[in-house]
């Protein structure tokens, strides 16, 4: 059996009792930290759960799936995942492979950025396609035009856009709001579709679920040089606003926290 165990938004304290108890019942535990920046590590998780954990890198999980699938044929194997297990396509692909091999699967869901963004006051049903801004070296220096076009499509339909940031976990590199804004501004300079300009209103949500989380609303020009502190972070670009959404955002703008 292969069990996908969601850790939650921030650290080991966000695990549900169901997730914790399930992890303790597993014969083997694996964890990956490259799809979501957690404020914890393997050692802290091992202390809470009381079991040894094998940390997997991207290659092991995406290209060498037998690392986890082979033992799951005869043992109860758990994969610890930041946020919610199926917010990253990597994990649904692994579940698909397990199903093809006849391996029983189970999922323990958890909190994620996709639910946490409700705190910024925008209506959840008005979000369009989620976008991830990659580090440019992954694209050989080319600009991620497709990300810009998805934002444009959402904007034309009046939908909000959740913009996630790239992670290179093995190098401990986490994209900052400034880096993401600069990339999107560079694309705007090229495309000139008025999708992401210095006057575009955005929300930056830093460390969702953490005691020191931070939410800032303003224009790109106002926020691009702001020091948001430690990751993880994301940007939300509002679409057409209901008056209740506008009122809430104005309260955020006036919040001096």
Image (spheres, rainbow, N blue to C red):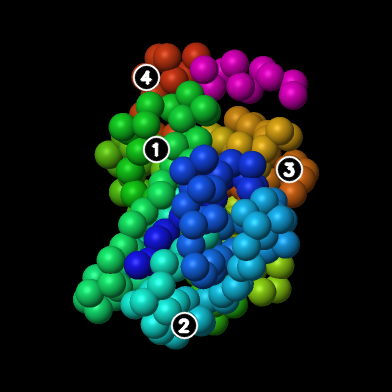
- Alpha carbon of mark 2 to alpha carbon of mark 1: how far? 39 Å
Residue 100 rendering spot, x and y as whole percentages: 22, 76
- Asked if one can make out residue 38 in the rendered structure from this viewpoint, the answer is no
Question: Looking at the image, which residue is at 61% across and 68% down?
Answer: 53
Quadrant hosting residue 145: bottom left
Return the disc, 3 or 1, that comes first in the chain's sequence.
1
Q: Earlier in the sequence, mark 4 or mark 3?
A: 3
Pointer 4 and pointer 3: residues touching (CB < 8 Å)? no
**Secondary structure type for disc 2:** helix
Q: Which tag, 2 or 1, sits closer to the chain's start?
A: 2
Q: Which mark is residue 67?
A: 2
Read off the residue under disc 3. 228
Q: Which residue is under mark 4? A: 242
In this picture, residue 100 sits left or right of residue 24: left
Q: Any magenta on residue 237? A: no
Residue name at image x 47 percent, y 19 percent: 246
Q: Nearer the viewer, mark 2 or mark 3?
A: 2
Q: Is residue 67 left or right of residue 222?
A: left
Question: Between residues 208 and 129, which one lies in front from this camera angle?
Answer: 208
């Amino acid at each position: 059996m292969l069990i996908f165990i969601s850790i939650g938004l921030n650290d080991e304290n966000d695990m549900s009792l169901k997730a914790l108890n399930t992890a303790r019942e597993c014969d083997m535990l694996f964890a990956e930290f490259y799809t979501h920046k957690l404020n914890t590590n393997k050692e802290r998780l091992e202390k809470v759960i009381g079991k040894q954990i094998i940390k997997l890198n991207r290659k092991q999980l995406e290209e060498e799936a037998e690392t986890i699938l082979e033992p799951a044929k005869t043992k109860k194997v758990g994969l610890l995942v930041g946020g919610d297990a199926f917010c990253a396509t990597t994990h649904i692909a692994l579940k698909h492979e397990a199903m093809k091999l006849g391996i029983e699967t189970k999922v323990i869901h958890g909190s994620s950025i996709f639910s946490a963004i409700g705190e910024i006051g925008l209506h959840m049903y008005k979000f369009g396609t989620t976008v991830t801004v990659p580090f440019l070296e992954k694209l050989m220096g080319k600009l991620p035009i497709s990300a810009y076009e998805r934002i444009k499509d959402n904007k034309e339909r009046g939908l909000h856009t959740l913009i996630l940031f790239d992670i290179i976990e093995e190098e401990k590199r986490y994209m900052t709001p400034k880096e993401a804004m600069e990339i999107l501004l560079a694309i705007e300079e090229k495309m000139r579709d008025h999708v992401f300009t210095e006057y575009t209103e955005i929300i930056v949500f830093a460390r969702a679920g953490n005691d020191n989380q931070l939410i800032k609303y303003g224009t790109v020009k106002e926020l691009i040089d702001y020091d948001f502190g430690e990751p993880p972070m994301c940007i939300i670009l509002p679409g057409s606003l209901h008056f209740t959404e506008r009122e809430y955002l104005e309260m955020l703008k006036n919040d001096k926290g």
